[in-house]
Structures are given as C-alpha cells and as structure tokens.
Image (cartoon, rainbow, N blue to C red):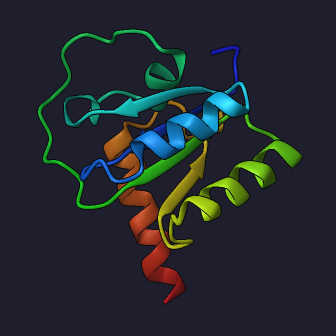
Amino acid sequence: MDQAAVLLYDPQGVWTEGVKKLCAQRALRFRRVEDGELGWTLAQLAGGKRAGAAPTLRPLPEPVVVYCKVGGGGLDQLLAGLARLGMPRTVLKAVLTPTNAGWTFAALYGELVRERQAML
C-alpha cells in the first residue's frame, strides 16, 4: 500500500459516511472493513487487494479505526476531524506497523481490547 489510508470497521454504520468524507478531504484512501474481512490481515486490507476467502468470524461489537501511513501532523489533523464528527475518544484506534501488518483484523481487535483492559 503506497497511499495513506484509513481502515474503518463500523458495525452499526454510524461513522462510515463522515469518515469517508474526512478521508476524501485529506486525500486519504478509505476502506470500510466488512464482517467477512475480519480474518484478513491488516496488510491485505491496507493494500486494497481482494484476499479471497477468509475464515468466517463473529462480527465485532464496536468500531475500530486503523491508520495506514498517516504520519505526524496528518494523524493529528485526522484525529481532530474525527472528534469534530463526534467520534468518542474511546473508539479503538491503531496504526499499521510492520509488527501488526500480519495480524488479522480480528486479532488486532483482541489486542486493542486487552490493552484497554490493562489500562483500567
């Protein structure tokens, strides 16, 4: 994936249109992650390629945002834009890294939930 992008899992569809517009304003590629893609790796999703069949996994109970190649000031602007949309700061967020690129979206969610629990 060459272009900066945002992956959004939005089970209720509450944030999709707003985040899509925000990404368009900032020349970021946007991809909504669907339930059937939760078994795909972050690298596959960020690369925009069809990965074929993945294991069927349970839908996640809450939204997750993943920033791909969005750096520095661009990330700060994006976070501010999400806040203006009314997205709670508590929505789970991550940055694509070499370490997590091979994780499935569902595995990333599990790790984010564990991190949140450790902070409570």
The residue sitting at the right extreme is 73
Q: Position of residue 109 (x, y in %)?
A: 38, 54
Residue 22 is situated, as x and y percent measured from the top left of the image, at: 62, 40
| Front residue of 111 and 36 | 36
Residue 50: quadrant of the picture: top left
The residue nearer to you, when weighing 113 against 25, is: 25
Quarter of the view holding residue 81: bottom right
Q: Examine the rendered structure and indicate whether residue 13 appears above or below residue 34.
A: below
- Give the left or right position of residue 101, taking residue 79 as reference: left
Quadrant of the rendering where the N terminus is positioned: top right
Residue lying farthest bottom? 120
Look at 41% across and 70% down and name the residue there.
114
Relative placement, left or right, of 97 versus 40 is right
Residue 57 in sight in this render: yes
Query: Which residue is located at x 37 percent, y 36 percent?
Result: 104
Q: Observer-nearest residue: 110 or 73?
A: 73
